[in-house]
Amino acid sequence: MNELRRVVTGAPWEEAFGYSRAVELPNGLVLVSGCTSTVDGEIAGGGPHEQTVNAFNVAFEALAQLGLDRDDVVRTRMYVTHARDVDEVGRAHKELFDAVRPAASMIIVSGFVDPSLVVEVEVEAYRREATA
């Protein structure tokens, strides 16, 4: 593969702000943009655990469009608005990635574009056969 591949899901912010949900580089690295618990334009799930699972599922859907899955994830970033949510967000991450063990960061931020969101996640994956 010698060119970039892009995943566009049609989410309203992608068009409004001019970005792709995911981009695959020629070297097999896949970068997934920040994902929230927004499904069909609505916030899905109330608590930090459920929002985290939903947000990672948005990322997994983008990876699936490129033929990848959670086993290909090598790095995650979780942005949370409250320190009190760290344990629930971390519990969701463990449930989803315990067998994969990607590099991970969790950062506390002041807020998101919609105040009902409590977490946003980013994912990086790697297509192993790209450089083989």
Image: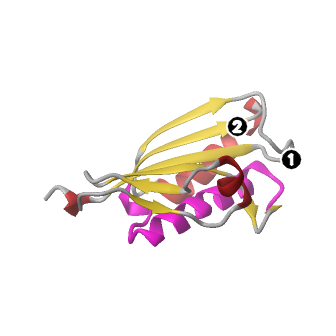
Residue 9 x/y as whole percent: 60, 66
Residue on which the image places disc 2: 80
Residue at x 55%, y 59% (from the top left corner): 59
Secondary structure mostly taken by the magenta-highlighted segment of the chain: helix
| Amino acid type, mark 2 | Val
Residue at x 73%, y 59% (from the top left corner): 12
Residue at x 60%, y 64% (from the top left corner): 57
Asked if residue 52 is among those painted magenta in the image, a careful observer would answer yes
> Going from the N terminus, do you reach mark 1 or mark 2 first?
2
| Amino acid type, mark 1 | Ser
Q: Which mark is residue 98?
A: none
Dots 1, 2 in contact, CB < 8 A: no
Residue 106 x/y as whole percent: 58, 34
Image height of 48 relative to 70, above or below: above
Taking depth in this image into account, of 6 and 29 the one nearest to the observer is: 6
Residue 80 x/y as whole percent: 70, 37
Image height of 108 relative to 70, above or below: above
Asked if residue 33 is among those painted magenta in the image, a careful observer would answer no
Q: Which mark is residue 116?
A: 1
Q: Which residues are magenta?
A: 44-73
